[in-house]
Amino acid sequence: MSGTIPSEIGLCQNISYLDLEETRISGSIPVEMANMSYLSDLLLSEIELLTGTFPYVVANQTMLTAPGATIRINGTMLTGEVPDVLCPVEGLVFDCPPMCGCDCPC
């Protein structure tokens, strides 16, 4: 799979599990993913062309902060800070640096 994550993905409101790991996706995480209110597992590891920051609105308006959630965003070109609301998620995996936040000494 290659290309960008289309903003229309936000129309898939009932998706709870999204695994795009090790694909050739490029570009950024669309803020429209905030409409995916049931999203609790987001796997974006090892997408070397994924850029930008992790949108706070996606972290705040989905189930990514629920107990048992999994967020893997390591092995990407994402930068900036991990949204604070994601720090308690036990299944959170990110690269530090280039991403900062939680217990990361940046």
Image: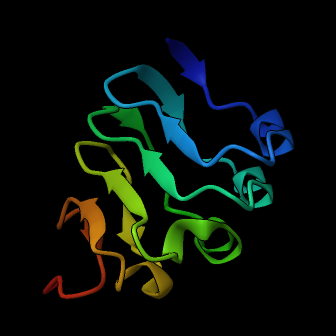
Q: Position of residue 27 (x, y in %)?
A: 55, 35
Q: Position of residue 55 (x, y in %)?
A: 60, 65
Image quadrant occupied by the C terminus: bottom left
Indicate whether 27 appears above or below 23: below
Taking the spot 61% from the left edge, 68% from the top edge, the residue there is 63
Can residue 5 be seen here? The reply is: yes
- The image quadrant of residue 21 is top left
Q: Is residue 51 left or right of residue 38?
A: left
Q: Position of residue 26 (x, y in %)?
A: 50, 28
Taking the spot 18% from the left edge, 66% from the top edge, the residue there is 97
* Nearer to us in this view, 80 or 42: 42
* Nearer to us in this view, 63 or 5: 63
Q: Is residue 3 left or right of residue 43?
A: right
Q: Is residue 66 left or right of residue 69?
A: right
* Nearer to us in this view, 26 or 67: 67
Taking the spot 44% from the left edge, 87% from the top edge, the residue there is 84
Taking the spot 28% from the left edge, 74% from the top edge, the residue there is 90
